[in-house]
Image (cartoon, rainbow, N blue to C red):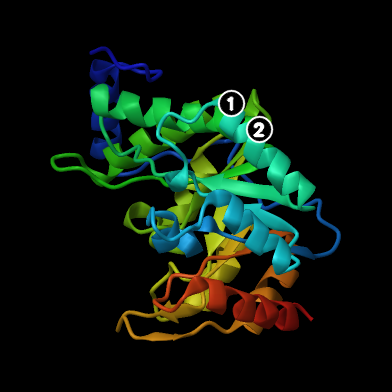
Amino acid sequence: MESSSKFTRRNWMLGTAGLAAAGVVAESSDAAQPIADRSAPKFKLSLAAYSYRKLLQDANSGVTLKTFIDDCAAMQLDGTELTSYYFPQDVDADFLYDLKSHAFRQGLSVSGTAIRNDFGYPPGEKRDKQIAHTKTWIENAAKLGAPVIRVFAGHQKKDISAEQTHRLMVDGLAEVCEFAGKHGVFLALENHGGPTATAEGLLKLVHDVESDWFGVNLDSGNFHSDDIYGELAQVAPYALNTQIKVVVSGPDKKKVPTDFKRVFDILSEANYRGFVVLEYEEDKDPREECPKFIEVLREAMG
């Protein structure tokens, strides 16, 4: 199957061979810059449907995406993040508009959505599917009224060098960003393992994707270095969306409570303006725990 990417397998191999020989990936002359036109910080609270993942995947729980939206309204949130994983596989416009209507009637913005994608595949059928899936959800997000989609870069594949992987990811992100811009939807790259496991790796990708519709999804729980908050501070100026987990863990993998005040201080220093989304991943009942942590976030916001 012929790839729908902007370059063929042959051109990709020739280009990446040159990069590998040089040992570097050239940085774009139009590299992304920190968002500089924000005059003062402003925070709006939302909750990720991923927090309800076990309930939304259990047909007997009685919890649906509408139930989740109602819970967000009961918590007096500003928004609701509707993770794509819990939508019907072949979701149609009627379903999307019905959810959009339900959220609006509850006084909520759809703060965003999130998808699974991997642009580490070389040209071919697997890569085409990842590109097509992302474009489908860009169209879905536009129908939902979701301004941003959290996306991943992906992972390095066997027999593909780090330099080649970087080129693949940059090209994939650039292609879907061009499509996203035509639908008025932003794409926000999450720090989520692989090449984005560190602030340096994440920003290397952000700098090389030339698009006004691209930025960072800052996840407070996904850096695991000895300087977690330092790395968050490095990427905060590029953040289009922020997700906060209730714990962090360093190289020892030991979970400790997130310093919410410190995270908000970092966001304030970066003049971040936008949604701060609670993403609860611990084992207790999210319908009991999320309202508690939302109040903790409100207090930390000051």
- Going by the numbered disc 1, the residue's amino acid type is Ala
- The residue sitting at the right extreme is 39
Give the quadrant of residue 2.
top left
Residue at left offset 52%, top offset 26%:
92
Count of numbered circles in the view: 2
171 sits left or right of 37 in the view: left
User: Can you tell which mark lies on residue 93?
Assistant: 1
The answer to whether residue 257 is seen in the rendering is: yes
Q: Residues within 10 Å of mark 2 (few under 14, many from 20)?
A: some
Q: Position of residue 88 (x, y in %)?
A: 44, 37
Asked if the residues shown at circle 2 and circle 1 are in contact, with their CB atoms under 8 angstroms apart, the answer is yes
- The residue sitting at the top extreme is 2
Q: Residues within 10 Å of mark 1 (few under 14, many from 20)?
A: few
288 sits left or right of 297 in the view: left
> For numbered disc 1, what is the local secondary structure?
helix
Mark pair 2, 1: CA separation: 6 Å
Residue at left offset 47%, top offset 71%:
221
Give the quadrant of residue 89.
top left
43 sits left or right of 134 in the view: right
State the residue in front, 32 or 110.
110
State the residue in front, 220 or 195.
220
Residue at left offset 58%, top offset 26%:
93
Q: Position of residue 94 (x, y in %)?
A: 60, 27
- Give above or below for 208 relative to 240: above
The answer to whether residue 212 is seen in the rendering is: no
User: Can you tell which mark lies on residue 2?
Assistant: none
- Going by the numbered disc 2, the residue's amino acid type is Tyr
Q: Position of residue 259 (x, y in %)?
A: 58, 84
State the residue in front, 46 or 182.
46
- Residue hosting label 2: 97
Question: Dividing the image into 4 quarters, which one contains the N terminus?
Answer: top left
